Amino acid sequence: MPDLTLERIDTLRLARSEGIGPVNFRRLMAEYGGGTRALAELPERLRRAGRSKPAYVPTREEIQAELEATRRLGGKIVLLGDSRYPAMLSHLLDAPPVLSVLGDTRLFSRRAVGIVGARNASAAGIRMSETLSAGLAAVDIVVVSGLARGIDAAAHRAALYPGLTVAAVAGGLDQIYPPEHKNLQAEIAQKGCIVTEAPLGTVPQSRHFPRRNRLIAGLSLGCVVVEAALRSGTLITAHMTRDYGRELFAVPGSPLDPRSRGGNNLLRQGATLTESSEDILAELPETILAPAPLPWAGNSGFSEASTPWGNEVEDLPKAMREMRSLLSPTPIAVDDIVRRCQFSVSMAISALSELELGGFVSFLPGGQVVLLPEALI
């Protein structure tokens, strides 16, 4: 077993517990200072939040088995607050509590750009993806993509020689997806880096891909959409990029090609028109963000008042009732729901977090929240 303290194991148990999403993880860690104390308080917190049945919490033995299996694979588990956790990700309200990583984590401390696009890419789209990726890697910019067919694979391959590519994947590190990318995935693990939120053994399913998209957008200073249809999943990454305050780029295409309509629409909405890597570099920040201050990680500069889980003495049950009445099974941006309620931002986030603990709502990647079916009964 890796040389890890019980506190670290308990922190991983908390992150893997039922009903504990990224927002609640940060909130509980901030309140209790660590995983062990947070787990001890969790049953009472769940009861107060209205959960009618016990939540699943993995045992220490289960977590130790996951850590050992990850180590045998050559991977690492990185927790939010670790020195190796990507600084760019740490600033997201919905930053993943746990990352499983295979490869060079030093790439997380370098400037990075996401390149995403259609799986059924055109020959011109493939060439553009390769050209942009090679141009960025030539000036030491890391290329982040999702290891999908088409645009993603082309972007990875063009940045492989200098080892400047990160693949964000939807399944566990032990899963090969798509199957034809077995060799490419192995090369990226050897020369670059593979990262996922999913535990080992997780077979990629459609519901996992928004989390992968969050990683691409969150790791990057900006993202480039090369080709995308109007209803393409690529646009999820584009919208996350914009929501996270990162730069958004799009390659123009023929209006006669459905694969260009999503990118052209982004251009109409203000994305930077991109025809070369120079267009990207002209808009890209010179440095990445410093790690976000986190109280349990011992970072200086943390201010409870500056966080959305601050200690406001307000009527939490009333805020929970209002939030529940405003939500529906249709996802809505957290920012939008906060603006519609009568409470402060910190109280609104606290109310949503309590509803998640109770099993009534779920936070989705990209800063959205949705009412679960259980809340409609």
Image (tube, rainbow, N blue to C red):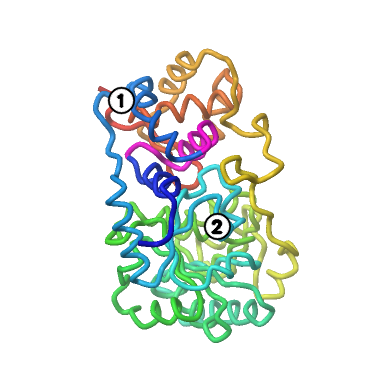
The residue at which mark 1 appears reads as 51
Q: Amino acid at mark 1?
A: Arg
In the image, residue 157 above or below residue 235: below
What kind of secondary structure does the magenta stretch mostly adopt? helix
Side of 125 where 67 appears, left or right: left
Query: Which residue: 37% across, 60% down?
Result: 170
Q: Which residues are magenta?
A: 18-33
Q: Depth-wise, is mark 1 or mark 2 nearer the camera? A: 2
Q: Secondary structure at mark 2?
A: loop
Q: Residue at x 36, y 23 (%)?
A: 44
Looking at the picture, tell me which residue is in the foreground, 153 or 108: 108
Q: Pointer 2: what residue?
A: 85
Asked if one can make out residue 32 in the rendered structure from this viewpoint, the answer is yes
Q: Nearer the viewer, residue 264 or 117?
A: 117
Q: Is residue 267 left or right of 329 when viewed as pictured?
A: right
Q: Are marks 1 and 2 in contact (CB under 8 Å)?
A: no
Amino acid type of the residue that numbered disc 2 sits on in the rendered structure: Tyr
| Residue plotted at (51% across, 44% down) | 94
Q: Is residue 32 magenta?
A: yes
